[in-house]
Image: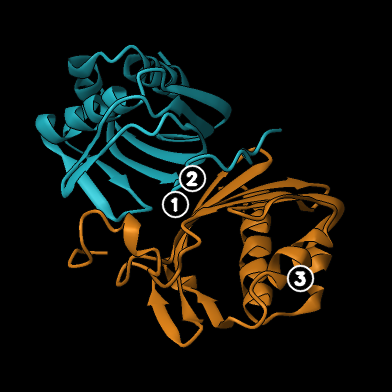
């Protein structure tokens, strides 16, 4: 793994930490014109859109933490793909990726000039399993 | 054939509904996990059924590939799953009747290859809404 790859991984780790802590300086990791994608939010253009996306969770998200030790980093060129899980609490209900249905994610980061130029987040935004109708296989499963 | 070519061909095989061909893309112990459901499919019957079921429900299913990222034996694809819900969707707990609705679901697939075949396939589809079609697929 090249030092460039290590730099990208360090930056991605820092993103998860700052995002989990709700720190405004998470934006410093992004380029001004960064592109953000999140399910149901769609696209945001410009790094401030990251906060627009975060705002959608205001009043419901009590806390979130990505499981740093279990992150799988896959660097390639300008990209870094990260598979992982998160745990947290929303509207009084908890989730823990791999233990509950919600909380598994795959992030695709793209980098330019040492900062994040785009971040696409793929996950089921139904973190706490409220979407009963979609549990077609029941809830008594391995997560 | 490079790993990218192999995976692009695997999508083609699924697209033309070549079930034996799809199963043959996997190692004998290969798995396919739908990460949105936490369901893992393994073995020729289960792996083949996943393509069959969705081909029946979405006869015009098209997988539009946007970005292919390769790191050794790992291939990641950002794509959208496009199709019209024209046939019955057979699921383990019942059948969802055709709705006629269009689906264009963003998705990220992570393939890990071993000896030139798929050992694991993690699929992260954004198909969580009963309306099927939030047309918000990432493109670059």
Chain letter, cyan in picture: B
- At a point 17% along the width and 16% down the height, the residue shown is B20
Task: In the rendered view, tell whether residue B62 sits above or below residue B77.
Answer: above
* Element assignment for label 2: loop
Residue B7: x, y in percent? 40, 23
Instruction: Confirm or deny contact between disc 1 and disc 3 (CB under 8 A).
Output: no
Q: Where is residue B92 in the image (x, y as percent from the top left)?
A: 16, 46
Find out whether the residues at labels 2 and 3 contact each other: C-beta distance under 8 Å: no
- The residue that label 3 is drawn on is A26
**Eyeballing the image, is B75 above or below A82?**
above
Q: Where is residue A92 in the image (x, y as percent from the top left)?
A: 46, 88
Q: Are marks 2 and 3 on the same chain?
A: no
Label 2 and label 3: CA atoms lie apart by 33 Å
Q: Name the residue under label 2.
A: B131
- Going 27% across and 64% down the picture, which residue do you hit? A143
> What is the total number of numbered labels drawn onto the structure image?
3
Left or right relative to A51: residue A78: left
Q: In terms of image quadrants, where is residue A85?
A: bottom left
């Amino acid at each position: 793994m090249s030092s460039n790859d290590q730099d990208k991984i360090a930056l991605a780790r820092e993103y998860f930490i700052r995002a989990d802590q709700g720190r405004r300086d998470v934006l410093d990791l992004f380029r001004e014109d960064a592109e953000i994608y999140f399910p149901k939010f769609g696209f945001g253009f410009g790094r401030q859109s990251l906060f627009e996306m975060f705002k959608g969770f205001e009043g419901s998200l009590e806390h979130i933490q990505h499981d740093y030790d279990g992150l799988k980093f896959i660097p390639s060129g300008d990209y870094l793909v990260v598979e992982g899980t998160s745990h947290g609490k929303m509207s009084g209900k908890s989730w823990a990726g791999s233990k509950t249905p919600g909380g598994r994610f795959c992030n695709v980061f793209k980098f330019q000039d040492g900062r994040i130029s785009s971040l696409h987040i793929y996950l089921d935004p139904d973190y706490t399993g409220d979407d009963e109708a979609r549990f077609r296989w029941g809830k008594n499963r391995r997560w | 054939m490079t790993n990218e070519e192999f995976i692009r061909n695997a999508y083609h095989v699924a697209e033309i509904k070549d079930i034996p061909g799809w199963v043959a893309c996997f190692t004998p112990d290969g798995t396919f996990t739908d990460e949105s459901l936490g369901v893992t499919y393994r073995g020729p019957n289960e792996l083949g059924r996943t393509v069959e079921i969705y081909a029946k429900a979405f006869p015009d299913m098209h997988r539009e590939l946007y970005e292919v990222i390769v790191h050794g034996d790992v291939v990641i694809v950002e794509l959208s799953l496009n199709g019209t819900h024209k046939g019955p969707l057979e699921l383990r707990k019942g059948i969802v009747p055709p709705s006629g609705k269009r689906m264009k679901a963003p998705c990220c697939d992570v393939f890990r290859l071993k000896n030139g075949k798929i050992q694991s396939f993690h699929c992260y589809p954004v198909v969580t809404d009963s309306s099927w079609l939030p047309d918000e697929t990432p493109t670059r």
